[in-house]
């Protein structure tokens, strides 16, 4: 083998793979509009991308796993937390997390209300991107969704509705990202420890203003219409009484899944 | 003694590179302290700013080192003085102005907010001008000489490629997926593409000088190595296209070709090991020998093997966005690029300061080598432990991000401890550079 041979290997190989790369790039371009739902990419989303960049968000956070590792991944954050909560959080992170407890805290960036609204539109749009199934399991900001290892994890196709509900609660439903089931542990929403008993008590109480007549109905109402009755406690709702809990569950959960969740939650006594 | 008077420009580039390197470490420690928390500077200089400065200084000092190395190498390879020393000085001044302005701007929150490419657009144009001045200056030098070696061709091809591939980073995109797609054209095709040419060129030059081996043989294999770089690295870009909204075939394309990326780095390690093995450690500048051989081996581990460890999509879906990347990133950049610049500086320093190679074989210089590679190896291990634990607890078992971070605090302490060892080595290196004395540039032999 001579230098002329290896030189040919270098130039021919480089030319070939450059051409293949450019070909794949052109094809990739033709798929981006569909894969990223560019019809939903309106000016608010674009402004939100600029907010994301201007405040240097990706030098702490990751988005689609890209960025820095000092703060949680935000790919599914709007689905997990809801815009109401996130807007309040972004305005004043210190009201929601404790630097003494967590060793770190998001700085108060002084985002304006329109900037917050735009960046949340952007994050909502990003979650709709077809990311080839990433992340394979929800990444939580805080708390724990004990899933077990593959093979021994709680299964969403279990026989008993309560078991299916538990799997949904900890897994795809990501309920565990905001609600602990351990007593006294507050994540974003209230702990659901003993919620089977609490729900029955609330329905019986004179201050209850919802439509449910039993614990099961109360739990169903809380999932589907979270603002109907607000659990006591601060930082659970906007000042005008809208719960921070996302109101999209009637859309994202099938009726059977709501039944399963209720069947699980009512057993927490 | 310098062979060509104009090679003295390299000293200024190397000195600037070492100042920026020291600053990079300072901001690295600042960012690391924030991992340990709490952060008294939260609203003054937050993590994002400290980290952006840390990574940007890395890119700037490495490129400064590469350009300084080129100004040292090109006269010797082409056997002629640099076309214009004045242009080289102007280039350095403009380059440092753009770099310092960028970093100061970050302190005031002026950023484009794209990791590694945070520099404001107008200053990015400044960088393009700097690169054009540089390429013009070396092109004119070579044209005047009429002698152009493969070694310098590979080095300059790498630098020209870096300038060319910087351009996609200038285009704004409204679609985040496209923004990511082309950001990797800069970042990936730099560090896993054209920068490897820079490393290969510098490595070949150092091996020719340090071993006295036959240039024809070395340059023949250099083509194989850089051929393997592009064979694997171009389509290997696909390992950044798994999860950002690009089609599913990138999982196969990126997985397969990026799995081949270690070949080029392993090639460089075998190359250096064989050549030095044949010649023996006879060259009196043993510090340069250490860095040269060390770079080839460390890059094979850090860039090659540790990159391979998480590049396969079935693995990457769990490790993506964890400290596994931090682990790989630190050792890869250090092994492949920082160490080759240190090798060039150590090789050139005796000539630049008018001392003999043997005089520059200091204990301090050797201590710097062992402390830095020992420290970096330790940092890599600490980050590996942090990354594996994080992947397992957060991604697989489903513990929250914040709880997981609490669990890996002990690894951050180890990261800090090993970083202190690394910094001690860096301090020794810089002090050894200062101690070598001011540059002296007696005219070389008539040309």
Image: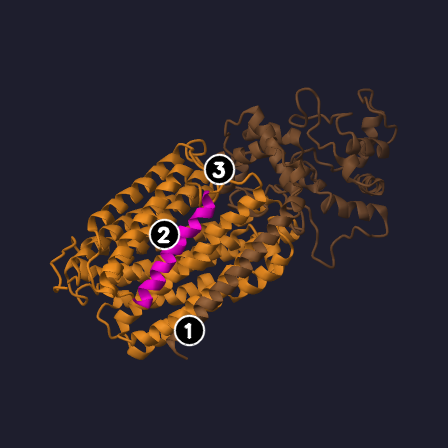
B89 magenta-colored: no
Callout 2 crowding tier (Cα within 10 Å): few <14, some 14–19, many ≥20: some
B168 magenta-colored: yes
Structural distance between the alpha carbons of marks 2 and 1: 44 Å
> Are both tags, 3 and 1, on one chain?
yes
Q: Chain of mark 2?
A: B
Q: Chain of mark 1?
A: A
- Disc 1: which residue: A6
* Residue occupying the point 81% across, 48% down: A163
Magenta span: predominant SS is helix
- Vertical placement of A13 versus B35: above or below? below
Q: Position of residue B437 (x, y in %)?
A: 16, 54
Callout 3 crowding tier (Cα within 10 Å): few <14, some 14–19, many ≥20: many
Structural distance between the alpha carbons of marks 3 and 2: 28 Å
Structural distance between the alpha carbons of marks 3 and 1: 45 Å
* Residue occupying the point 23% across, 59% down: B144
- Vertical placement of A40 versus B128: above or below? above
Q: As rendered, which of B272 and B112 lies closer to the eye? A: B112
Quadrant in the picture for residue A23: bottom right
Kindly tell me whether residue B226 is visible in this rendering: yes
Numbered circle sitting on residue A56? 3
Q: Which numbered disc, 2 or 1, marks the residue closer to the eye?
A: 1
């Amino acid at each position: 083998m001579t230098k002329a041979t290896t030189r040919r290997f270098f130039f021919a190989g480089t030319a070939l793979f450059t051409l293949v790369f450019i070909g794949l790039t052109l094809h990739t371009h033709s798929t981006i509009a569909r894969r990223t739902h560019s019809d939903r990419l309106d000016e608010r989303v674009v402004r939100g991308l600029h907010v994301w960049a201007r405040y240097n968000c990706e030098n702490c956070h990751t988005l689609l796993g890209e960025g820095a590792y000092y703060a949680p991944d935000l790919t599914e954050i709007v689905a997990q937390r809801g815009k109401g909560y996130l807007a309040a959080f972004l305005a004043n992170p210190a009201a929601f997390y404790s630097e003494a407890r967590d060793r770190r805290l998001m700085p108060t960036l002084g985002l304006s209300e329109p900037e917050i609204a735009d960046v949340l539109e952007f994050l909502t749009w990003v979650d709709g991107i077809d990311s080839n199934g990433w992340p394979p399991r929800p990444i939580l900001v805080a708390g724990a969704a004990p899933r077990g290892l593959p093979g021994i994890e709680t299964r969403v196709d279990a026989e008993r509705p309560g078991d299916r509900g538990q799997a949904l609660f900890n897994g795809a439903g990501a309920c565990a990202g905001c609600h602990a089931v351990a007593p006294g542990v507050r994540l974003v929403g209230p702990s659901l420890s003993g919620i089977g008993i609490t729900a029955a008590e609330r329905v019986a109480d004179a201050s209850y203003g919802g439509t449910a007549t039993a614990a099961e109905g109360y739990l169903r109402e809380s999932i589907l219409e979270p603002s109907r009755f607000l659990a006591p406690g601060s930082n659970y709702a906007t000042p005008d009484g809208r719960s921070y809990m996302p109101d999209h569950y009637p859309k994202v959960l099938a009726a059977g899944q709501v039944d399963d969740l209720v069947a699980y939650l009512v057993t927490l006594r | 003694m310098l062979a060509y008077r104009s090679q003295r420009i390299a000293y200024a580039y190397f000195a600037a590179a070492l100042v920026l390197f020291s600053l990079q470490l300072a901001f690295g420690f600042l960012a690391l302290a924030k991992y340990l928390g709490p952060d008294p500077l939260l609203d003054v200089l937050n993590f994002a700013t400290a980290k952006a400065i840390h990574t940007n200084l890395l890119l700037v000092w490495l490129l400064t080192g590469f350009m300084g190395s080129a100004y040292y190498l090109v006269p010797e390879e082409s056997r002629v003085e640099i076309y214009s020393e004045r242009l080289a000085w102007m280039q350095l001044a403009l380059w440092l102005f753009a770099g310092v302005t960028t970093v100061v701007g970050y302190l005031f929150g002026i950023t484009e907010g794209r990791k590694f490419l945070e520099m404001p657009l107008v200053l990015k144009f400044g960088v393009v001008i700097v690169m054009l001045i540089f390429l013009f200056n070396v092109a004119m030098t070579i044209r005047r000489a009429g002698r152009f070696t493969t070694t310098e061709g590979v080095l300059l091809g790498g630098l020209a490629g870096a300038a060319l591939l910087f351009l996609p980073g200038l285009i704004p995109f409204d679609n985040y997926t496209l923004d990511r797609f082309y950001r990797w054209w800069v970042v990936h095709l730099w560090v896993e593409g054209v920068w490897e040419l820079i490393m290969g060129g510098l490595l070949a030059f150092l091996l020719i000088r340090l071993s006295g081996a036959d240039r024809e043989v070395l340059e023949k294999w250099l083509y194989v190595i850089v051929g393997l770089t592009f064979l694997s690295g171009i389509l290997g870009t696909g390992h950044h296209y798994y999860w950002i909204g690009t089609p599913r075939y990138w999982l196969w394309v990126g997985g397969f070709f990026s799995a081949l990326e270690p070949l080029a780095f392993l090639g460089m390690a075998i190359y250096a090991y064989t050549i030095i093995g044949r010649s023996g450690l006879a060259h009196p500048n043993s510090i340069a020998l250490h860095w040269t051989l060390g770079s080839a081996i460390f890059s094979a581990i850090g860039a090659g093997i540790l990159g391979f460890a998480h590049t396969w999509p079935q693995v990457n879906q769990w490790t993506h966005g964890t400290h596994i990347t931090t682990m790989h990133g630190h050792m890869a950049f250090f092994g492949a690029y920082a160490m080759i610049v240190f090798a060039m500086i150590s090789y050139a320093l005796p000539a630049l300061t008018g001392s003999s190679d043997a005089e520059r074989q200091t204990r301090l210089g050797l201590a710097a080598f062992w402390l830095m590679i020992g420290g970096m190896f330790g940092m890599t291990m600490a980050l590996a432990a942090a990354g594996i634990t994080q992947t397992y607890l957060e991604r697989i078992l489903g513990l929250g991000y914040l709880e997981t971070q609490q669990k890996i605090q002990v690894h951050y302490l180890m990261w800090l401890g090993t970083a202190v060892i690394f910094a001690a080595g860096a301090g020794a290196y810089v002090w050894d550079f200062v101690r070598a004395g001011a540059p002296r540039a007696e005219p070389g032999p008539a040309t």
